[in-house]
Structures are given as C-alpha cells and as structure tokens.
Image: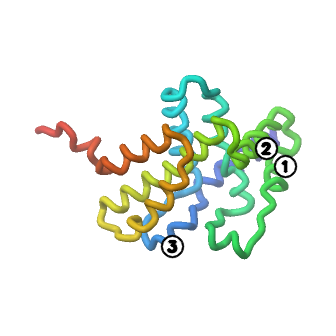
Amino acid sequence: MTRIADLLFEVRMLKDLNRNGYAFLGVGQESIAEHCFTTAFLCFVMARLEPDVDAEKLISMALVHDTAEARTGDLNYVNKHYNTVDETHAVSDLIQGLDWAKDIPDLIDEFNQGETMEARLANDADQLSFILELKKLKDLGASSPESWLPLVVGRLRTETGKQLAREILGTRWDEWWTRGYSE
C-alpha cells in the first residue's frame, strides 16, 4: 500500500505543476492535472460519439498521458529542441513495484504512437483541451490565441475531433451560462 500511496502523491503533484506553454501566449495558466481532467472528459464524450471504440482505454489513455510530467516537468515545443526527456524511464519509476499498473506505459506508448482509433481520439482530445483554453482566452480579449488556434486545429486527425473543434470555435466560452438567461 505504501507504493500505491507514493503513486497517488506523485500523480497528485500534477495539480501543482503548470503547463509552461502559456508563457509563450502571454496569458493563461493551467496545471497539468487540469489539462488531464479536461482531456479525459473530452474522451468520455468522444466515446459516446464513437460507440465502437474501447471507452475505458480511451479515457484511461487521457488520464495517464502526461503522468511522466510529475517527474520530467512539462516541456513546450521550444524546450524540446534543447532538452531530452526519458519518459519511458520516468514512467517505469512511476509504476515500479506495482504489477497491476503495467498497463500505464502501454497506454502512454499507444497514445504517443497514435495508430489506433483510441489513440487518435485521445490525441485529438489533448488538442481540444488546448483549443478550449485558447478560445476562452480569445473571447476574453487576448490576441495571442488568434495565431495559435489554426496551428492547434491543424493537428486534429479524426472527424469527431474536427467537428468538436468547429463547434467550440463557433461558441462563446460563456454561452452555456448566458443562453436562456432570465431573472
């Protein structure tokens, strides 16, 4: 049980670690855990839109896809030009002594390879999570998301991901709150 407690504290650390790409935007902030939650919820939705996929695998992939960052930190695309991260080693240490957790590296590898439908959807959910944040920032008046949105949308690989992106981009971030408002 001690190893399980260690794992839980390590994954909990993702709440305290911010994604660092927002520095390039000049606005916004998000923890790795917040990003993973949104990605997992997007996968939950996508599993309902794509009933032939393995929903548990899809959602699990989203939950664990960035767990190595508790050990490695979050590297944005510029950082990756100058730093090499051994994600495999980080994940191996993360699950050391937990035989039941051996599927975590398999899920992360599948996510990174992006070959299965579940992996393509999970990767799209990863991008859609960022699109949601960029759209909110744009709606609040930030100008930098304007140049990033086309790049992130261009990464989408599934029709479901592209349809969701179109709807997100066509909806104001707070419209769910104000639609039908009356006192």
Tag of residue 170: none
Q: Decide which of tag 3 and tag 1 comes sooner along the chain.
A: 3
Left or right: where 17 falls relative to 177: right
Tag of residue 24: 3
Q: Position of residue 98 (x, y in %)?
A: 84, 38
Furthest-top residue in this view: 51
Tag of residue 92: 1
Whether tag 3 and tag 1 are in contact, CB under 8 A, the answer is no
**Rounded to the nearest whole Å, what is the CA distance between mark 2 and mark 1?**
7 Å
Whether tag 2 and tag 1 are in contact, CB under 8 A, the answer is yes
Q: Decide which of tag 3 and tag 2 comes sooner along the chain.
A: 3
Q: Is residue 155 above or below residue 163?
A: below
Q: Position of residue 154 (x, y in %)?
A: 51, 55
**Mark 3 Cα within 10 Å, few/some/many (few <14, many 20+)?**
few
Q: Decide which of tag 2 and tag 1 comes sooner along the chain.
A: 1
Left or right: where 59 falls relative to 130: right
The part of the image, by quadrant, that contains residue 18 is bottom right
- Residue 26 in sight here: yes
Determine which residue is flagged by label 2.
105
**Mark 1 Cα within 10 Å, few/some/many (few <14, many 20+)?**
some
Q: Which amino acid does the dot numbered 2 rest on?
A: Pro
Residue name at image x 30 percent, y 66 percent: 141
Residue name at image x 62 percent, y 42 percent: 120
Residue name at image x 53 percent, y 49 percent: 156
- Residue 9 in sight here: no
Number of callouts: 3
| Front label number (2 vs 1) | 2
Left or right: where 38 falls relative to 111: left
Q: Position of residue 171 (x, y in %)?
A: 30, 47
Q: Which amino acid does the dot numbered 1 rest on?
A: Ser
